[in-house]
Image (spheres, grey):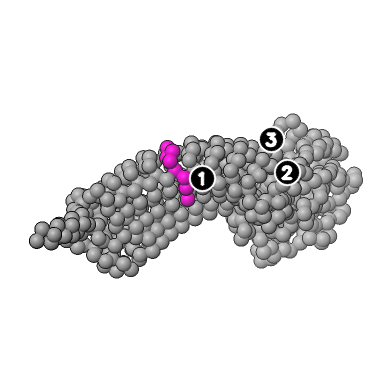
Amino acid sequence: MRTSIVVVALVIIPISFAHAQIPTAERDALVALYNSTDGANWNENTNWLGAVGTECTWSGITCAGGHVLWLGLWLNGLRGSIPAELGNLSSLEWLDLGSNQLSGNIPPELGNLSSLQNLYLYANQLYGSIPAELGNLSSLERLYLYHNRLSGGIPTVLGNLSNLRHLHLHDNLLNGSIPAELGNLSSLERLRLDHNRLSGSIPPELGSLSGLLALILEHNQLSGNIPAELGNLSSLEWLHLNSNQVSGSTPAQLENLSTLLDGFGLDIAWNALHSDIATLIAFLNGKQRGGNWRSTQTVAPENPTVDSASDHTVWLSWDAVSYQSNPGGYEVFSAPTGSGLWTSCGWTDAKTDTTFPVTGLDPATTYDLVVVTYTDPHPINQNLVNSDFSPEVMATTASAGCAQPIIAIAWGDPITLFVLGSYDSYLWSTGETTSSIDIVPLFDQWYWVTVTSAGPCEEAAAVFIDLGPFFEDGFESGDTSAWSSTSP
């Protein structure tokens, strides 16, 4: 008889433990999640909304010590919004709602989960900003918010998460700059911010992340130089900065990144980077995905040369760049020598073009001239990429008393361009030799004409045909104040 009593007692104890009641606030939080995410139609909802005391048997729930410890409902058909009540799961260590159809904002109340170690909200349709309150999650090791529609900036307070090992914010609509405070994440191993709209420079503070294995910033709008400090990342296996607007000399310190995976660990293509250090070029080629990191860089043309100078015109030429596989061209800038006040003088329509007339200049004046290569947005890099300046060349205009020709525009179909006044000869950029030409442009484009007259005088005038708003006065005078002051 005593033996049977002992057996019954042993059976009752585990059953009672499995049905231990969690706090009412935690049950209410789970019920709120069920109701706000169409729980009746989840892929798996076994035991949900059962009697008080059964919560730890609900599918996806793990308890310990009378509290909800894990909540894992990934790939479970959740639809709707994340309820703020989840912030009341005070002992929660694991929250995975990834790969569902959740929408709405991330509740700032999730910042109350002081025990949370893993927060997975990836592959949903969440929008709005990343709550700054997530910076309070001092125990957090993994933050996966990728593949959503999150916008706004990256909160600087995420730099407080000293235990964070993985920060994955890629494939969102985030904008603004990368916070320098992310350099405080001393435990970080993987940082993915790619496929967003982030701009500004790469913070040199990221070079202090000594345990970093992967730094993925590709397909953003980042500009400026690659910080030399990235060469301190002695454990780095992946460095992807491709398809941005990063420019300048590639730092020699990147040759220290010996742990980058051969053949695919590096990707810095589709930028405006250059180097003349043979050992660095060879090292990076060996790590670059697809090899030859320089083949898709938008670099400045070489050998800019002044071919001729008259009172108001300087003809400039240069060597074409080798990267011509994507659309773009060259923009020419001038500045009175020593002023540093650069003015755009126009741009070509193709990277095969190697000459351009700088018009509308003052007689008897010395100018500095430079050329910039640009690559238009294309499917691989949706940014406009500009190279550094070419070497400067200097030209002094003449003072022979020649007049600046003027191109007038008669808007219609076709558009007629004609030179005001009479000259001895005309040569248009289209090859025609008459005083007027008819054009039917398919895109915005520069046209110019070279004229000669007694003296002898040879001058040029250039005009930009913008298929958007027309010039109110109907003509271009050669006054560069009417031209673009920025890159096209």
Q: CA distance from mark 1 to mark 2?
A: 25 Å
Disc assigned to residue 341: 3
Q: Answer with left or right where residue 429 lies relative to residue 37.
A: right
**Which amino acid, by three-letter code, is at mark 2?**
Leu
Residue 360: x and y, percent? 75, 43
Disc assigned to residue 189: 1
The residue under the point 18% across, 57% down is 10
Q: CA distance from mark 1 to mark 3?
A: 45 Å
The residue under the point 43% across, 59% down is 123
**Which amino acid, by three-letter code, is at mark 1?**
Glu
Q: How many marks?
A: 3
**Which amino acid, by three-letter code, is at mark 3?**
Leu
Residue 445: x and y, percent? 69, 57
Q: CA distance from mark 3 to mark 2?
A: 35 Å
Disc assigned to residue 279: none
Asked which secondary structure carries label 3, the reply is: loop
Asked which secondary structure carries label 2, the reply is: helix
Residue 124 at least partly seen: no
Residue 250: x and y, percent? 69, 42
Q: Are marks 3 and 2 in contact (CB under 8 Å)?
A: no
In front of the other: 79 or 484: 79
Q: Which residues are magenta?
A: 160-168
Disc assigned to residue 280: 2
Graded by Cα atoms within 10 Å as few (under 14), some (14 to 19) or many (20 or more), the crowding at tag 2 reads some
